[in-house]
Amino acid sequence: MFGANRWSASGNDTDTSLIDHRTTDCENFQPPRAHHIDCLSRRDDRATSESLLRPPILACVQRDVALVLAISIFNICDRQPSRFFDAVLSALLLVALSIDFIALSAIIYRLATFGITPNRIAVLIVNMLVFVNLLGILISFAPAALRRIEAGGAKRWIARFLPVYAVWTAIVVFALPLIFRFR
């Protein structure tokens, strides 16, 4: 007992199961961005209309749209008028809108095919809210981007829309479980 290596499972000094286990974990480690790229470009997935219907792929797309929304909000709130960056931000908003529209159609298809559940309703409505928010930001940001002036309209839109997310969160937490009888 006292002469054995207390870190090994078998008690002999040549047991490397702990080291082997750590090596395997380190080899499987991926940074978050690498995992995201992997989830969108798996070797077994083909670019079909059904690939977006898979929940992991749809979750990756939704996360990207939410990241674009956050990036655009922070960039608009701390914006220095610049033709190049305004064009990039506008293009980013347009791409995010088109991707969110595709994701919305996939969510609606999943809802029609697999039925209504509380999770699907919550995801559908939050994606609709994100779509409306991105569209409102783009519409209110466009005049400021074209004239290179302060983006006061976009900032007001962002400030007015944030309580909508809070209300929807309260509905998801308190009302949706009651509506679906805690299923």
Image (cartoon, rainbow, N blue to C red):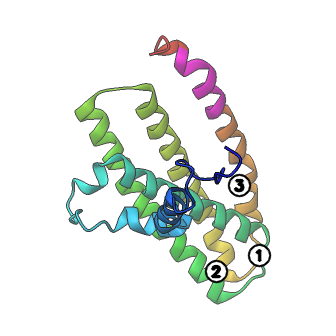
Asked if marks 1 and 2 touch (Cβ < 8 Å), the reply is: yes
Image disc number at residue 79: 1
Image disc number at residue 86: 2
**Residue type for callout 1:** Arg
User: Where on the picture, by quarter, is residue 81?
Assistant: bottom right
Asked if marks 1 and 3 touch (Cβ < 8 Å), the reply is: no
**Residue type for callout 2:** Asp
Residue 102's spot in the image, x, y percent?
35, 56
Mark 1 Cα-neighbour bin, 10 Å: few <14, some 14–19, many ≥20 = some
Q: Which residues are magenta?
A: 168-177
Whichever of callouts 1 and 2 sits on the residue coming sooner in the sequence is: 1
Q: Residue at x 53, y 66 (%)?
A: 26
The residue wearing badge 3 is 158
Q: Residue at x 45, y 26 (%)?
A: 118
Mark 3 Cα-neighbour bin, 10 Å: few <14, some 14–19, many ≥20 = some
Whichever of callouts 2 and 3 sits on the residue coming sooner in the sequence is: 2
**As drawn, 119 above or below 67:** above
Q: Quadrant of the C terminus?
A: top left
Secondary structure at badge 2 equals: helix
